[in-house]
Amino acid sequence: MSTTPSPHNVRPNQSKRVALSSLAGTTIEWYEFFIYAIAAAMVFDKLFFPNFDPAVGKTLSLSTFTIAFIARPIGAAVFGHFGDRIGRKKLLVVTLSIMGGATVLIGALPTYDQIGIYAPLLLTVLRFAQGFSLGGEYSGAVLMSVEHAPEDKRGLLSSIVNTGSALGLMLANLAFLVLEKLPEEAFMSYGWRIPFLLAGLLVFFGLFIRVSLDESPEFQKVAKAGNIEKMPVKIVLTRYPKLVILMALSYLSIGTVFYILTVFSISYGTGQIDIDEALILRLILFSTIFLVAGIPFFGWLSDRYGRRRIFIGGVVGLTILPWAWFPMFGSGSAVIMFIGFLLLFIPYCANYGTMPALFSLVFPPAVRYTGLAIGYTLGTLATSTVPIIATYLMDKTGAWQSIAIYMSVTGVISLVAAALMKEHSEPAVREKTETSSVH
């Protein structure tokens, strides 16, 4: 793997500013993801669906959460198309504005008691807007980081973007842990709104950085050479459908393990093996601190030993280690449980830390935004049902081994897909031929 610095002509410290901007966007994305999930489970059924049976209201509330997963592939196609047509930077300003604006508006929404049926309808529309913008946010943020970075630092600088998932999770948990101390009436009235309104500060910070960034050097090369594609979505779906599918399948093991550890572990621990919910939440919270260091470490490592090698090694770990995690989680010892979480999060970091650079360079620059956005969001859509599938398997079999088998199967699928997925090796642009004749 080449370690020669990229010839990109960028301003000093631009790559670091881009990485910081992208980190801010990813942090907002995951912060929004978790505060919505928490609010949907705790308050939305009572405030936006109060006229239904409690069980039905809870189901309707949680169903609004899943709408974002449906909207993301649509947003990926739209923002990917324009990101390849008019540039990465412009679209990132748009996606962050839509995402942040929708989140803040949710925090200001009137409830069902105030405006009736319009309350849940507006909640659904704003949730769709969040998912729609998220379909382009992550891919554009990663691309800006990778395409601005020197070749020998692409893994490290782009992996910093992915630490936003851990930071977003920590911020969301901390916000609700503080606000839960309010009296119930105060929390239901205005307390739950505060985390959504605070997103506005994160968005302002992200936009402040983004508006001063340079456009991606590789996009500028494509534009200068006149190689802008008119229909990048069509090009991706007709010329590179195999790569889209392989990228989505390569993501399966990452998403599966993440949702098992951060979502399913709560219901499994409290319902099946009688572990205190507060202990599980602390285990998850402290594990995310490890992720903040582990993800960029493996990104740095990938710059020295190769992205695909580190990524595939991580998939192997995610395939095998669930068989150790479940017994450790059920041991009853907080120390052993914490070690179990760290044990499975190590290969997760290897995957998630190398994924941004690896996935970004699979498609040629002229359709890179579109290809990455569609492939990645299809992968996230496929893993959005992981907690449901795990719960179903547990109910049907009563044995954790069935879920470990499920996790291992997704690992094998990701392993094969990652082995078949190659980085694009053609020149960044198609050089225009020059005639040798003299006119």
Image (spheres, rainbow, N blue to C red):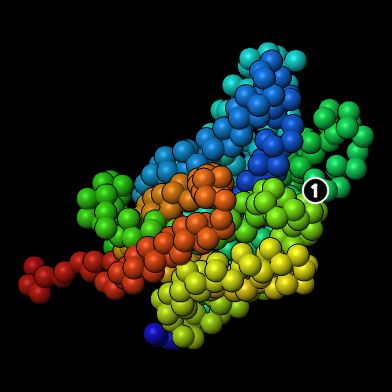
Locate the C terminus by quadrant: bottom left
Q: Residue at x 76, y 55 (%)?
A: 275
> Is residue 411 at least partly visible in the picture?
yes
How far across and how far down the image is residue 55, in percent?
Answer: 66, 26
Tag 1 residue: 175
Counting labels gives 1
How far across and how far down the image is residue 27, in percent?
Answer: 65, 55
Q: Residue at x 62, y 73 (%)?
A: 343
- Depth check, front residue: 39 or 426: 39
How far across and how far down the image is residue 241, in percent?
Answer: 26, 54
* Residue 146 in the figure: left or right of residue 424: right
* Residue 200 in the figure: left or right of residue 86: right
Locate the N terminus by quadrant: bottom left
Q: Residue at x 50, y 42 (%)?
A: 69
205 vs 103: above or below: below
How far across and how far down the image is residue 73, in percent?
Answer: 42, 43
207 vs 194: above or below: below
Q: Amino acid at mark 1?
A: Ala
* Residue 333 in the figure: left or right of residue 415: right
